[in-house]
Amino acid sequence: MSLLQKASIITTPTAYAEDYLYSIKPAIPFGDELIVNGNFYTNLNNWTLSTSTPPVWFQGMMKMASDGATFSRADQSFTTKVGVQYKVVLDKMLNTNTLQLKLGTSVGAGDLLNASLTTIEVHTFTITATTTTTHIRLEDGGSTEGGYVGSVSVKEITDADFDFTRASTGTRVNEDYLIEDVPYNLLTNSEDFSSWTNSSLTITQDSSNNYPNTSSGTYKCVKTGGGTSQRIYQTYSMGGQAGDTFTLSVYVKPTETIIGLRLTASGTASVYTDITVTPNIWQRVTFTHTTTGVYTSLITWIYPCGTAADNDSSTGGDAYIYGAQTVKNSLPKEYLKTTDRLDIPRIDYTNGEGSILLEPSRTNVMPYNQTIDTGWSKLNVTVADNQTTSPDGTKNAGLSTVTSTNADHASYDTVSGALTGGNNCYISCFVKKSTTRYLRLVEGYTNDSIYIDIDNATISYGGSATNGIIENYGNGWYRIGFEFVANVTGDAQLILYILNSSNIQSYAGNGEAVYLWGAQVEEGSYATSLIQTSGTAVTRSADAADNAGNSDLINSTEGVLYAEINSLTQTLGSSDEAISISDGTLDNRIQVYHKKNLSNTIAYGIESGNAIQFFVSVAIADISLPHKVAIKYKANDCALWIDGNEVDTQTSVSMPSGLNELQFASGNGASQFYGNAKSVMVFKEALTDLELEKLTGYNNRELYMNYYNRLSYLGLLEEYNVESDINNYIL
């Protein structure tokens, strides 16, 4: 059996949605059906019915037959596991009167779920069991029939998906190596059109024409008659410049042949387009617009036009709509659902391969980090915005050009009291060579600095600057920066000096110039992902991923916890950065972590019944680079493997109990992991040394596939038994 088959949980940088980071294994996320006769095919057997006014069977449904005075009820109990989540699904098929759905620890109790259902649709809920037996009750809502139930289902949730939170947007480097907002869909409530502003339309949710493979989220736009401006729209606050490009897309099922789409940037020309569509089928329509001036907001409009081109005053033309999206750039991108645009994980491609990016909360105190001709000061330079394509793929980077004055030449921005005096901070920006290779980046209040040679991608230090970077972002762009200690007042000043071809700061200018974009000053000892600003400081909230797995997927007796990870810095601050399996507390846990207050240190340990079994620290070369780490745990047989080598063993160890949760943190949610994760796995058995060497080793697949291809070319595969070798050494 391969290692991938043996793993009970596998998380990789693949799928995600609001509030969730999905794992790729287990593939089947739900257990067996726990409700007996939940489809009511021929009768209501296995349900305990109220005696005075019992529900009745009606054409494959359960009818809550109230007599106007006595409640009509149906009960059933099922076996559950304490602390485990269950998915509850009920299909209300007829009658909009109130149906009560209760789940609880005793008959008739609603302490786990007490929902009043009036809409005719599929209702979905999640509960967490608190006892070994859980009771479900269906009940009418009072003096009228409670409705008709087509089916009811309860299944254990056996997936290993992480609950994910980040109460803000963020940025990432996407698969095209461009810096991108997360989420890239700029619209909120992309499926709930009742929250949009509408004009001369009636917006109603209509489950009779749902978009394929969805249970809700389809709305019908009904035109109320003649008159202009029959549309729905949503305004998104954002700052930008002329030349920014956006693409609007929406799924529609129109009754007639024209759909109108429109994008408007505040203070600029409004652009409208008619799109010919096929009536009565679902299709995705798109529209791309490039702005013509400076703006502070973007408005997305949708018009059900009818049959008359560019005529929103016509009658008729109602349409079902689903899944609206507005994105930067000229491609519609894969549709991404949003509600409040928060809590969406980031898959980052900065290093060429996708990884899960988790970062602490940071605030960019630079109020104008893209528009250097707005809010910035100039010292013997001229500045123009929107001169070339920036690392986010749009033409919004500025150009700073020296004047002929014989003096220093710089662009700079200043903020007062934005930092905490004495704290470690990081200053950075993106630069691209225009006509000069030499620059000096300075924090003005401390005079700490780095000197940059763009051609050779090298830096040297001035003052007390430390931890400098010059990182290649492609297309000639580099992110440069360094760590400094904020002055007593907490003021900050980012200065970019343009040096001449002789690497001299003060000179008579001769057209030397550099492109500049993405300035950032943040409290912390290293640079984090770009935080966009447009007039004020902006905070990105911390990422957190936890609550994956359960006792069926995690073995408390023996197993392996594996992670391919790197930290965001070589030296951590005052908190460990952990990945653990636990019982949700610190009392019983197995964890691997980057060690606080130490440089380049990986540690691992086990705690059982609030008794520390061991915690061991191991020094490695550079924790900011990816490493494959595995903890084997079994009574009196524990080991730590890093990059194909066994680096520590423990032979006197008791195992923890009740392990049921995998998280990017320690057992109680503290010591959050911040860094990149290419893979996290859990195994329910202690692997052999050979398996652990394979699991944590580097380049085994490439090595043996090259070997295989070479011997295949020479016709020597059978003689050298290469198939067996490959199966032994690769996953």
Image: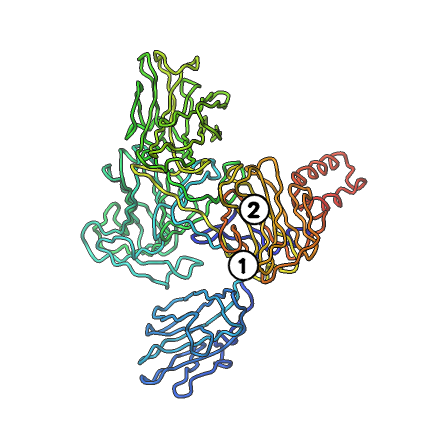
- What sort of colour scheme is used for the picture? rainbow
Q: Which three-letter amino acid code belongs to the residue tagged 2?
A: Tyr
Using the image as rendered, state which of residue 186 and residue 302 is in the foreground: 186
Residue sitting at x 41%, y 31% = 428
The answer to whether residue 212 is above or below residue 710 is below
Secondary structure of residue under mark 1: loop
Using the image as rendered, state which of residue 525 and residue 191 is in the foreground: 525
Q: Residue furthest left?
A: 227
> Label 2, label 1: how many angstroms apart (C-alpha)?
24 Å
How crowded pointer 2 is (Cα within 10 Å; few <14, some 14-19, many 20+) is rated as: many
Q: Which three-letter amino acid code belongs to the residue tagged 1?
A: Asp
Tag 1 residue: 159
List x then y, in percent, for residue 72: 38, 82
Tag 2 residue: 593
Q: Is residue 27 left or right of residue 313?
A: right
The answer to whether residue 398 is above or below residue 436 is below
Using the image as rendered, state which of residue 469 and residue 31 is in the foreground: 469
List x then y, in percent, for residue 23: 54, 53
Residue sitting at x 34%, y 21% = 410
